[in-house]
Image: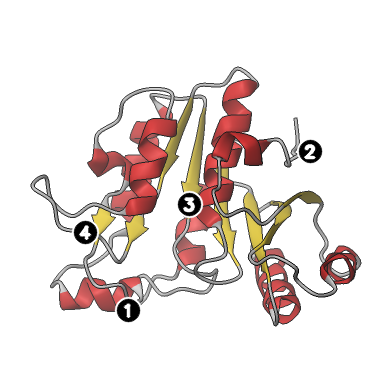
């Protein structure tokens, strides 16, 4: 095991928050850590090229200085599904290229934390899906469950899909997406009894997320 693959029940559920929290926790445990967001949509133009907000947060969290192209090999401007953004840009997302860049990062760190894009069943092209990438990387999967109305269905469907793969399901993180969520404890209890993987932590809702503080809530993260 040389890292983790972070996926989510949907887009906007806190994958980057959990990615940064996991990176922080691993660094506290003495590991050299690198982070990667292989594919990103909704990137902003800059003098240096397209830049993604999540990837720009991951870069300073790495133990060593890495070029943007390694942290985010595929950046697309339209904020749409990655395979559609890639097609509109006249590019194809190569799983083999992402795996190659991942192995380059392995040379710089003890652990590489890879953040997926969108949810679990996201197309990367005409043939490849996000699980194909996760399988090629052979990393344990951490599922981020965004706590909100409808999350039980999304969480159970995603957990079942991960369990049907040959990958290790390392655990799930519950992330409170809004203050005062009704029956939050009951939702978590429901998922605890139905997801065949450990709950690694519950991240509270916060107007201003501090990754280092969020790492404190991953109290059951594996040693």
**How far is mark 4 from mark 2, CA to CA?**
35 Å
Task: Count residues near mark 1 (Cα–Cα under 10 Å), then give few for <14, some for 14-19, many for 20+.
Answer: few
Q: Position of residue 143 (x, y in %)?
A: 65, 58
Disc 3 versus disc 2: nearer the observer: 2
**How far is mark 3 from mark 2, CA to CA?**
20 Å
Which residue shows up at 25% across the image and 60% down it? 43
Give the residue at mark 1: 126
Disc 2 versus disc 1: nearer the observer: 2
Name of the residue lying farthest toward the top:
30
**How far is mark 3 from mark 4, CA to CA?**
19 Å
The reply to whether callout 3 and callout 2 are in contact (CB within 8 Å) is no
Location of residue 75 (image quadrant): bottom left
**How far is mark 1 from mark 3, CA to CA?**
21 Å
Location of residue 101 (image quadrant): top left
Q: Secondary structure at mark 1?
A: loop
* Mark drawn on residue 219: 2
Q: Position of residue 144 (x, y in %)?
A: 64, 59
- Quadrant (top left, top right, bottom left, bottom right) of the C terminus: top right
Q: Secondary structure at mark 3?
A: strand
Q: Earlier in the sequence, mark 3 or mark 4?
A: 4
Q: Is residue 98 above or below residue 112?
A: below
Q: Earlier in the sequence, mark 2 or mark 1?
A: 1
* Mark drawn on residue 44: 4
Give the residue at mark 3: 115
Q: Position of residue 115 (x, y in %)?
A: 48, 52
């Amino acid at each position: 095991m040389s890292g983790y693959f972070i996926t989510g029940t949907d887009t906007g559920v806190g994958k980057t928050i959990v990615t940064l929290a996991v990176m922080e926790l691993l660094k506290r445990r003495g590991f050299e850590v690198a982070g990667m967001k292989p594919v990103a949509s909704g990137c902003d133009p800059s003098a240096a090229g397209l830049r993604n907000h999540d990837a720009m947060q991951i870069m300073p969290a790495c133990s060593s200085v890495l070029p943007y192209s390694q942290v985010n090999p595929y950046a697309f401007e339209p904020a749409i599904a990655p395979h559609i953004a890639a097609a509109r840009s006249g590019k194809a997302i190569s799983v083999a290229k992402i795996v190659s860049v991942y192995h380059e990062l392995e040379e710089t760190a003890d652990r590489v934390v890879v953040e997926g894009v969108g949810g679990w069943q996201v197309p990367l092209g005409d043939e490849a899906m996000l699980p194909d990438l996760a399988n090629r990387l052979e990393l344990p999967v951490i599922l981020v469950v965004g706590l909100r109305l409808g999350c039980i269905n999304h969480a159970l469907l995603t957990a079942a899909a991960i369990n049907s793969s040959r990958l290790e399901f390392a655990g799930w993180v519950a992330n409170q997406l809004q203050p005062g969520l009704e029956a939050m404890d009951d939702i978590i209890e429901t998922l605890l009894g139905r997801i065949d993987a450990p709950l690694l932590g519950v991240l509270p809702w916060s107007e201003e997320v501090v990754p280092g503080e969020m790492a404190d809530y991953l109290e059951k993260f594996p040693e």
